[in-house]
Amino acid sequence: MRRLVSETRVHPAELVLPLFVREGVNEAVPISSMPGVSQHTLDSLKRAATDAAEAGVGGVMLFGVPETRDATGSQATDPNGILNVATAALVAEVGDALVVQTDLCLDEFTDHGHCGVLDDSGRVDNDATLERYVDMALVQADAGSSILGLSGMMDGQVDAVRTALDEAGFLDTAILAYSAKYASAFYGPFREAVDSQLSGDRRTYQLNPGNRREGMREATLDMSEGADIVMVKPAGSYLDVLADVAAMSDIPVWAYQVSGEYAMIEAAAQNGWIDRRRAIEESVVGIRRAGADAVLTYWATELAGWLR
């Protein structure tokens, strides 16, 4: 009876699995703050993506961890860089079974860890960063990425990338705009996952956690610039923002269940304080109930298996 009258359901196709691929390693490297998640080699990455496809997961989101970094994140736009090589490899491996997506941001590739290039005073230069994002977009699209995840929170990033993609003939490459991305403490484990070089924080370009209306404003701006999907991130502590955006949006709205959300449940479960499976299922149902059409979650493959 409870199943029959349930108002909110989760389907495997509504889940996206974030994956990390690391250059220069011979075997997958476990991420200590995210039990069960690893930085992959190309081979283990393909196996993880195949497992996700077989479970019915809707897509994978790729993040690259390069061996070398510099001030402008040059590896991000190298066709032979780890993220772009991995993208092409996954498109060939599982591109007919799920949607291969890529993170479009410089933070993994810069030696200062910020999401953009810095000016002479050490501040992120918004417009100079847009030029780098455009270059990244063209390389990622050429590698076969179907959806570009614009996560850097630079003003005008959607318009700049959409214009460049269209002019280059990548008319079918979609844009996922990380529109309401807040300066959150819940990103902590992710810093280990991508070996972030960041010192300080990103509060000058990510949203203030206290600002609900600003999340709606940013989503509206990205929609007007041509975004195909808008994102709220993190998910669990911003369900009000997610509900606001979902109520007004006429395009898909996604949410990212971030590393800190994952780590808290795993840690509590390992200590026997909560029922792991029930907590995972409830957390994702709550995100869907608030209005997310799809959820990026590190449990995507495992959860999809339970659902099937």
Image: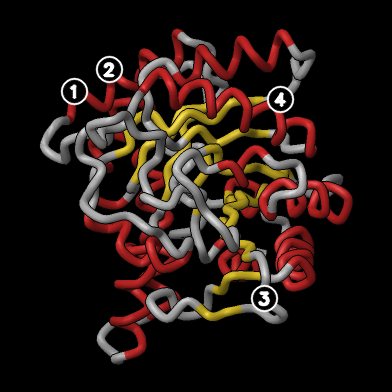
Give the answer, above or below, for where 89 lies relative to 156.
below
Q: Amino acid at mark 4?
A: Thr
Asked if the residue at tag 2 contacts the one at tag 1, i.e. Cβ–Cβ closer than 8 Å, the answer is yes
Q: Residues within 10 Å of mark 4 (few under 14, many from 20)?
A: many
Q: Residues within 10 Å of mark 2 (few under 14, many from 20)?
A: some
Q: Nearer the viewer, mark 3 or mark 2?
A: 3
Residue 294 in percent (x, y) is at 52, 42
Q: Kindly identify which residue carries mark 4.
A: 173
Q: Nearer the viewer, mark 1 or mark 3?
A: 3
CA gap between label 4 and label 1 equals 29 Å
Q: Would you say 161 lies left or right of 96 here?
A: left
Q: Kindly identify which residue carries mark 2.
A: 217
Residue at 45 percent of width and 14 percent of height: 223
Q: Which mark is residue 213?
A: 1
Give the answer, above or below, for where 71 lies relative to 266.
above
Residue at 56 percent of width and 66 percent of height: 303
